[in-house]
Image: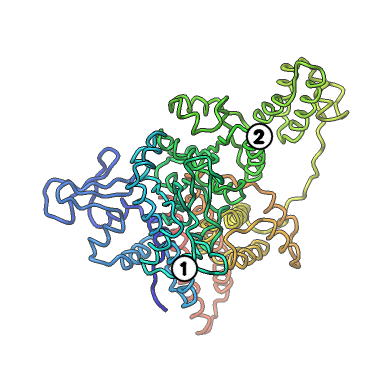
Amino acid sequence: MTFFVDNEIVEKVRDASDIVDIVSSYLPLKKSGSNYVGLCPFHNEKTPSFTVSESKQFFHCFGCGEGGDVVSFIMKRENLSFPEAIKLLAEKVGIEIEEKEPKDLIKTEEKNKGYEINKEAARYFFNNLKENAKVLDYLYKRKIGNKVIRQFGLGYALDSWDALYKYLKGMNFKDEEIYRVGLIGKRAKNEGYYDKFRGRIIFPIIDTKGRVIGFGGRVMDNAMPKYLNSPETYIFNKGNHLYGLNLVNKLSDRKRIIIVEGYMDVISMFNKGLNYAVASLGTALTERQARLLKRYGEEVYFCYDTDKAGINATLKGIQLLRNEGIDPKIIFLGDYKDPDDFLKDNTIEDFEEKMNSAYNHVEYKIFISKEKYNTEETEGKIKFTKEIAKIIKDLKSPIEQDIYIEKIAKDMNISKEAIEKEVFGNTKKAKGTTQYKKKTIITPVNTSLPLASLTAEIDLIKFMIFDRDYYEEIIKEIAVEDFNSLECREMYNIINRLYEDKEIIYEEQIREEIMTVENMDIQLVKKVFSKELKFSPNNVNHMIKDLIHTIRTNKLENKRNEVKLKIEEMEKNKNKNYLEEKLFIELCMELTNLNKELNLIRHEEGR
């Protein structure tokens, strides 16, 4: 088998390698403001001019001019090739790089070929744009300058049937390879190929690993369709990605993330300095995209178009995000159709003011319902109140219910008691407090596992289901035998099997399968699926690491207790023979090693 570095390995190693920690292992660094400084390892100097930026994960020497990221540093310092540097860094940060089987290499090489073709196509489109004054003038009039054009890699597809095809053929790519990534179509009767993108501004779609996975194209006149997107391919699934997320990943602080409808909305916002906007790729919001929003933003905002289609998409999106444990906010732009239109006439401060006054999901539904009915008339007021009563009834919090009942009663000049009856029916207590349906009491799960360890196992299972990236990080650290709970072990195996041929998996799939397994504790299984996974994008990696430490610690403590018990039993026997003496010594050595491992884990937790 061969050592092979693909983009996913590179990305994982880069993410895990903190440049300050790595450089500090080679030379002393001293904190200076937001950066670290030291003597440059690449030239002789007495006054420190070597600077390391923790926030940018970058180094630069003002003396000799050397600079780059953590991989560049290792390559230069250790005199290694790029793959060798990645391998060394992986060893330093504890990432195991598995050697690829030949069939895996073939699959990886096929994908890399697809990424390479798209990259060359993106360069071709970009160069076309630079040389086309008419298209540049169109973008400049929309206040999109060269910086944003470069940032997003915008391009232009010539109004030609085969210009791109001929260019890529000249790069020695094969017809079938170009066809498979969706850039060309087959002519009738299979008599050659034609370019799918013609006479359009091109928006390369780039994933968080920096790979061009597809394209969007927009006309500059009133021709239809206005937008054309790459088809689904073996390297591009629309529902798995968000346009602009690569730049959010790179530039934003992840405090906020805004989901908008189109490419131009994202670009207009970045153009104004709002570097936390993303767009779905011509499809309704998917579960995978909802998970990405949760992963990349602490607060999630909708800012879809204000037409009927945009309102319906917002309402559906709200429900989808709430199913993922996110309470989104909704930005309303008044008479403006979309963020692009709003930002043509207004400043970034005006937009942020709209953000600060954004609706929560209930307020937005109330606002939309109010727009539907004339509440000045009796019939409209009745219909509006009945519709809002259904929304209030679905709220889980009695406090929220009470607040909105009070609000609607005041706004509509209807008695609070009447609205309560509409919401809850005739289940009101005599003293005026609302009688809520009594919840079924579930007997606590009968298990000998410590609560912290069981909770950690459940949370790790939830993370594995939630995102494939989290799954891949977890399985590098924890094996199925590390789980004490039989139910979690079974779910771990099911998840492993599902991920063998799927990029995304869902809780329903695991629930259906686990329920068919014999001897499962149904209460514990239900507990796994009913538990809400709460985390912030900024602390998720630390949280997963803590959960892994908890499971490892519990496993080691259980093992240590077993060994201690055996030692205590053997100590009672004072007439031990040679074999028993030997076993006694081995057990004592094992206990010492277990204590060392536990101390090491606790030391890592305390750092």
Q: Nearer the viewer, residue 453 or 171?
A: 171
x and y, in percent, of residue 177 in the image: 47, 68
| Quarter of the image with the N terminus in it | bottom left
x and y, in percent, of residue 372 in the image: 72, 26
Badge 2 crowding class, 10 Å Cα cut-off, few under 14, some 14 to 19, many 20 or more, is: few
In-image side of 595 versus 505 (left or right): left
Q: Which mark is residue 177?
A: 1
Residue at point 43% right, 26% down? 347
x and y, in percent, of residue 441 in the image: 79, 45
The answer to which of marks 1 and 2 sits earlier in the sequence is 1
Q: Which mark is residue 308?
A: 2
Q: Nearer the viewer, residue 455 or 144?
A: 144
Instruction: Tell me the element at label 2.
Output: helix
In-image side of 214 versus 395 (left or right): left
Q: Nearer the viewer, residue 168 or 4?
A: 168
| Picture layout, residue 54 above or below residue 233 | above
